[in-house]
Image (spheres, helix red, strand yellow):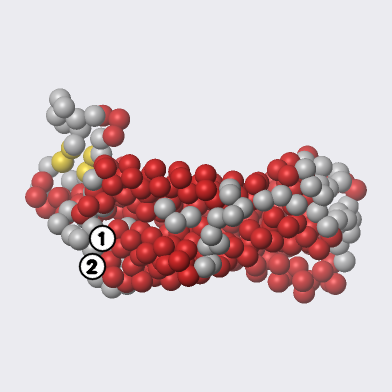
Amino acid sequence: MTLETAGSETSQPSTALVVADGNGTPTRVDTAVDLAAGAAAGALAGLTGSAVMEVFQTYSSSLFSPSGSNPPATEQAAQSAARLVAGARLRKADREVGGAAVHYVFGTVTGAAYGVLAEKVPGVTRWRGLAFGLACATLIDQIAVPLFGFARNPLRYTVRTHLYGYASHLVFGFATEAVRKGLRRRKASTQESAGITTEDLSVPILLGLANGQRTFTPPAAVTLAAAGSGLGLQGTPLAFLTSKWTGAIMTAAAIGEYIGDKNPNILARITPAALAGRAMGGALSGAAAARPGKALLAAGLGAAGAIAGAYISYRARAALSKALGRDAPVAFAEDALSLIGSAALAGYAALRENQRQQRQALPLAA
């Protein structure tokens, strides 16, 4: 038997979810959860792959003796970004740091896209990620970078330089796939793990890091998700988060914080009072987004992540503002990062809870 939420006249087809009859066919929620988890695993894998690639380049440059762009393409991209958002020209030291940031951010984003593709088209992972590395070297190094003006025509570089570029990206692809595969290795059983999983640690920590940037954004995102799907909070001490009024209050507080953050006289986020508020927000967000039975663990991780995120974001914002000569572009970028990250994490927690509820309903529908 198949259980369908789209089968009644009063249901809304645009948001309907179909649950399979237990024969292993994935539902729309299963697919969405897999794509989200694939993107997260790919992002972390891409970040790791970027680090491995940098180490390889450090120790192999003397062997290949590449004649690359001067300054490097990543530093040119950082310089262009600084001009675009702040009309500023970076100093040499800041340009080098910016180039490293471009390298890691681009690797992370590329890894996330690869992680999504790997869920839908497993063939992209062939040759243990070497095919992915080969594609990156060709599409990015050989085509995109010259088109954006960050490098000369590929024909003007030596063969050794091209070999160096391809070898570096093959290392990146291999390392990225190794990490992604390890993170996405599924158990044969479809039952939820009773122990502590990677998600039980990563989701509250990431929500906490976002809370370190903005006190009310993660709680607002989680509250809106709870009001829409419940997040499994009914009958728990956090059931008040399922109220639309709570969502409205949290959203208003978050908007107010965005406005107040632009005031140079606002209390610094690393003062005791501000840290306490962020820690409470991180604990609340982490507990609300946790799997059943993991709320206390998630609350502690969320609070710790918020404190760490406050210090990290404070130092990063100060350094970026100094490099650009302006604080406003950095402040707005930080708003966007906290908002997008919080919404993505809260949305994933809601999808995961829907998946859990559907799986529990399968035996009843059979």
Instruction: Say which amino acid is labelled 1.
Output: Thr
Q: Quadrant of residue 83?
A: top right
**Tag of residue 293:** 2
Does residue 19 sit above or below 200 in this rendering? above
State the separation of the CA atoms marked 2 and 1.
Answer: 18 Å
* Percent coordinates x, y for residue 109 in the rendering: 58, 52
* Percent coordinates x, y for residue 29 in the rendering: 31, 46
Using the image as rendered, state which of residue 37 and residue 237 is in the foreground: 237
Say what secondary structure mark 2 lies in. Answer: loop
Q: Residue at x 43, y 51 (%)?
A: 217
Q: Residue at x 34, y 51 (%)?
A: 222
Q: Quadrant of the N terminus?
A: top left
Residue situated furthest front in the rendering: 265
Residue situated furthest top in the rendering: 9
* Percent coordinates x, y for residue 21 in the rendering: 18, 46
On screen, residue 7 versus residue 107, left or right, reads left
**Tag of residue 190:** 1
Q: Residue at x 43, y 71 (%)?
A: 304
On screen, residue 62 versus residue 214, left or right, reads right
**Are there few (<14), some (14-19), or many (20+) residues within 10 Å of tag 1?**
few
**Tag of residue 350:** none
On screen, residue 140 versus residue 360, left or right, reads right
